[in-house]
Image (cartoon, rainbow, N blue to C red):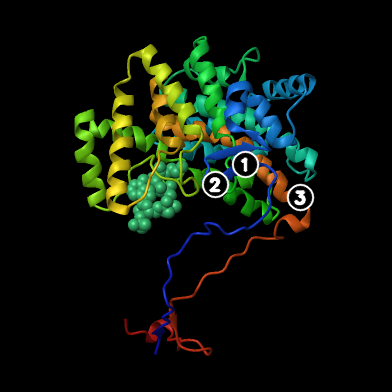
Amino acid sequence: MAVQICYPRIKNIGLRGIRVADTKISYIDGMKGVLQYRGFRIEDLAKYSTYEEVAHLLIYGHLPSRAELEAFDTRLREARMVPPEILDALRGRAKTASSMNVLQGAVPILSDHDPDFVDNSKEAVQAQTVRLIARLPTVLAAWKRICNGEEVVVPRSDLGHAANFLYMLTAEEPHELPASILDVCLVLHADHTFNASTFAAREVASTRAHLYACITAALGALSGELHGGANDRVIQMFQKIGSPEKVAGYVKARLDAGERIMGMGHAVYKTMDPRVPILLEMALELGEKSEESFWIKIAKKVHEVTQAEFKARKGREIYPNVDFYSGITYYQMGIDPDLFTSIFAISRVAGWCAHVIEEKFAEAQEKPVLYRPTAEYIGDYCGPQGCKFVPLKERKN
Ligand SMILES: CC(C)(COP(=O)(O)OP(=O)(O)OC[C@H]1O[C@@H](n2cnc3c(N)ncnc32)[C@H](O)[C@@H]1OP(=O)(O)O)[C@@H](O)C(=O)NCCC(=O)NCCS
């Protein structure tokens, strides 16, 4: 007879704090609120660099010289067009599909049209990376326009990465403020060490699968509401709350029911995430311009009440995470909430690719040959001989 194996149950920590590999790409000190890409503080990168510069830094390991940046940027601009097969595939999707699902579905088709796809050298994977960074925004903007019954907008090579995305989305000349704010958002989201989606990408890379397979896996992981999927849920939550006066009741009821407050808390930061003040400042700047600071009022109240309630209930602090104010920032730019997580993705693709390159080409001692964790078996067990197998026709149940 089968028995259930009973091990002493310990809280499953989901690999938190477990070192699985070494990385040179980014660094977080969750207790001090520090985030650095290849040694550079996120505050400095947000203030002084562009997404293109940061992507170069992540992929090639150093800040580009002027000539290197120009060459990299030119390659990105030249690679923006997507093959017509992609647009056909987008037109074939149900209009109800989420943009994250659509983006994920487009990646294998993009691989079909990558001339370096069969080459496994580091240079070829870097070339694939350039195409992915350049093309995902085109796919996303095209999808949104197809969904809205509008003409797809051809990318422009005279615009920077962020500005071109806004142009492809709206078919209008992008304004300077939203374009520069989006550029900073892309910088802030470009990498974040071994988060769930990056680990998914690296895990797939460790099987020696190709870059496009790794990015497809990462997109799936990012879509969940405990990861990148939180930013549109944050706006939905604010809309549901409806006014600053209703915040306290909403937060208390949710916590009483054991539910989570979207955009609050982080698996690594136990103090303020350094990206949050930068996002709040930009959200405030946009709010003043579009007079939608109503959402900021609700956000600040949710932040304040959740912190107070958390302190009273659990005796410790909780802080907003990157998704808390990024959603408001995009919302105030007039961007559809369905695109929020996908915008995170079109930025994070640089980090994912850098990690895949590291996984594939770093020294053997810096990472395992293949990730293969273990799990405690707690299912039925009848001893080493196995449970008695009863053929289907003799089975009573
Ligand atoms: C990100 C997240 C998954 C991290 O979870 P975690 O690693 O388990 O967080 P911690 O270890 O710091 O805290 C765990 C405790 O705080 C609670 N907690 C954490 N975030 C919470 C939130 N946003 N709302 C309510 N409770 C929360 C958990 O329920 C847990 O309670 P317990 O100890 O009584 O079981 C979590 O904070 C969360 O779900 N946040 C909301 C979703 C979100 O914004 N995701 C985007 C992340 S960038």
Q: Quadrant of residue 84?
A: top right
In-image side of 41 versus 123 (left or right): left
Label total for image: 3
Mark 3 lies on residue: 362
Asked if the residues shown at circle 1 and circle 2 are in contact, with their CB atoms under 8 angstroms apart, the answer is yes
Q: Position of residue 331 (x, y in %)?
A: 39, 24
The quadrant the N terminus occupies is bottom left
Q: Position of residue 351 (x, y in %)?
A: 62, 39
Q: Nearer the viewer, residue 84 or 363?
A: 363
Mark 2 residue crowding within 10 angstroms, few (<14) / some (14–19) / many (20+): many
Three-letter code for the amino acid on which mark 1 is drawn: Trp
Three-letter code for the amino acid on which mark 3 is drawn: Ala
Q: Nearer the viewer, mark 3 or mark 1?
A: 3
Residue 113 marker: none
In-image side of 345 versus 41 (left or right): left
> Which residue is located at x 43 percent, y 40 percent?
229
Q: Nearer the viewer, residue 98 or 374?
A: 374
Q: Position of residue 334 (x, y in %)?
A: 40, 20
Disc 1 on helix, strand or loop?
helix
**What is the distance, in whole Å, between disc 3 and disc 1 at their CAs?**
15 Å
Three-letter code for the amino acid on which mark 2 is drawn: Ser
Mark 2 lies on residue: 197
> Which residue is located at x 46 percent, y 29 percent?
277
Mark 1 residue crowding within 10 angstroms, few (<14) / some (14–19) / many (20+): many
Q: Nearer the viewer, mark 3 or mark 2?
A: 3
Mark 1 lies on residue: 352
Marked residue nearer the N-terminal end (1 or 2): 2
Q: Is residue 12 above or below residue 47?
A: below
Report whether the residue tagged 3 is closer than 8 Å to ligand 1.
Answer: no
Marked residue nearer the N-terminal end (3 or 2): 2
Mark 3 residue crowding within 10 angstroms, few (<14) / some (14–19) / many (20+): some
**What is the distance, in whole Å, between disc 3 and disc 2 at their CAs?**
19 Å
